[in-house]
Amino acid sequence: MIRVEGLRKRFGAVQAVDNVGFEAADGAITGILGPNGAGKTTTLRMLYGVMKPDAGRIHVDDVDGVATPQRAQERLGVLPDGFGLYPRLTAREHIRYFGELQGISGERLRDRTEELLRMLDMGAIADRRTGGFSHGERTKVAIARALVHGPRNVLLDEPTNGLDVMSTRAVRKIVRGLRESGHCVVFSSHVMQEVSALCDAIVVIAHGRVVARGTPDELRKQTGHDNLEDAFVALAGVELMTEDQWAE
Amino acid sequence: MGRVKPLHQMLVVMRKELKDSLRDRRALFSIAFSIVVGPVLIGIMMNRIADRQRESESVEIPVVGQQHAPAFVDWLRQQAGVSVIAGPQRPEQAVRDRLHDVVIVITDDYAEKFRSSRPATVRIVADTSRNAARPTLERVRRLMQRYSAEIGALRLIARGVSPAGVTPLKLEEIEISTAQQRAAQVLSFIPMFIILAAFVGGMSIATDSTAGERERGSLESLLVNPAPRMAIVAGKCIAAAFIAMTAVVLTTTLSANIPRFLPLQDMGIRFRIGRGEFLGVLAAMLPMCLFSASLQAAVSTLARSFKEAQSYMGVLVLLPMLPGMISAVSTIGQEPWMYLVPVLGQHVLVMGVLGGRPEEWWAFVTAGLIAALSAALLIRTMTTLFKIERIVFGR
């Protein structure tokens, strides 16, 4: 469970995040939807402890994420925006490295690594160096290493960005699997169709502020638009990309 | 989940960085090159000095016009290490073409002038701009001056005058072999090459694990792990220092084996890196590796891009050259304050060890402590840098 209240962050003259608050429940996928530059990534970065908020409160389960970011990080699995891998290490070595940093070792780490490789269908690429991986394969490695310590809460910052159709489907399958096993999943995207197809709850962010939140149905009612796309445009005051445009 | 120990996390980071960089073939190649280049260069230079000395010891002197001065030629032949050969047709051209270092030309009127006790002309054709020819020229000139003096003395005796009367000064040359000096000069490069190995050794891993990691975008993922920044930074610095230390050990080992391949004894040069000297060099150098690696990592962290970091590394590599260059121009003394300056202190210590006059133990301890303290300070600074969002996420 993740709860955020009154989160603020300013970069120079730009108020990137302005009083953002939401709650993400266990066993549900919470979508953070907003156009590029709306403050999604900054919000998530504060959540997973690599940026310090100017104000606001973060709770990951019952841990204070502002006062003790490292304890919150133990409960979080994170796929950052524009993540990178180590091209000279194999997929398996990536998982083991993060596992060891999380304090897992020996047989437990070996078992967990095998489990993740199986779960993400990575058997064929497990012992290859990631230098030559496709974007989809790289995403799988990044997700696997983020999940190595079995976190209850998973943050995915635009995980399907730049993926082809097959890889996007694979990621969605992984995300649904996480929900089914009771995880709290927060999933950011600027692609509306994706969020509406996948998420149980949606938080719409524009210009650093939460402009709407609720289930897809609630959002439709709230705006009076039957069409979700029109609903978002009305909410954000900004043209969101449709999946067709984005795929081009 | 139980709390993870920062020390363990530091070791995990260190192990990963070492594994990662040992797979970087290009970096390994440049490290191997920096390890080998110093000892090999020194070996080549020493060999040339030895060759040249051997050449000037047994010298072949081409003499033109031998028929005019048979007595002089016989005298030359009797000198140790000298053999006389027929002179070339065109002496000056032959020297210019480097067929001979020196050619002696006995003029046609030599016999006539010699008989009438007037100065007989003998020409020495040589090119003084050629360093390689200088020892031979020097030798030939000395031989001829000696012959001239001997004949002069004999003439005086024949006229009933003591030669002592015309020799107001008795010159005594105490020869310090130039070859030996030059060899000592060449050997004085060894400390510089050892320090250089430390800098080149740590360079690629220091940039790759900081500026490189940020540029690849893996830094943010790394920082999401619940590890104190200090543990991550220290792991990276120590990994770089470890490679630097390995480079130092290998360079010192290679340098220690130089005498095996070179006839230094024949040249009368004492050069030995025995067990004691080896340990002395390492005692001076290993703490410095912590400093040099941390300095490189800290500078790379400040760089805006990987490329910028690499160009800074190029400048930092000049640092170990400085003491060596200064000592080439003027002798660096061994002032106590020098131990307080990282790199300079180590240079002085290694010079002392290899020169057979190692410093007191407290000098090693002081220089080592200063290097380690500077490294700790740099790691602390880097930890602060790793908390600055502008630096973590690039600018």
Image: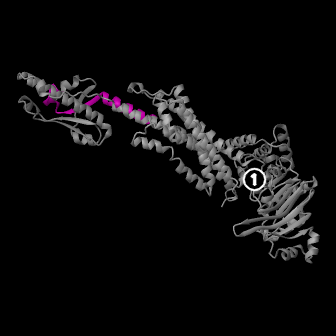
Residue nearer the viewer, A85 or B286: B286
Q: Is residue B229 above or below residue B81?
A: below
Q: Quadrant of the C terminus of chain B?
A: bottom right
Residue A172 in view here: no
Q: Position of residue B127 (x, y in %)?
A: 26, 41
Q: Residue B286 appears in which quarter of the rendering?
A: top right
Q: Residue A61 appears in which quarter of the rendering?
A: bottom right
Residue topped by disc 1: B221
Magenta stretch encompasses residue B64: yes
- The chain identifier of the residue carrying mark 1 reads B
Q: Quadrant of the N terminus of chain B?
A: top right
Q: Position of residue B143 (x, y in %)?
A: 22, 29
Model colouring: one colour
Q: Position of residue B48 (x, y in %)?
A: 39, 34
Q: Which range of residues does the magenta coloring cover?
A: B43-72
Q: Residue B110 appears in which quarter of the rendering?
A: top left
Residue nearer the viewer, B96 or B264: B264
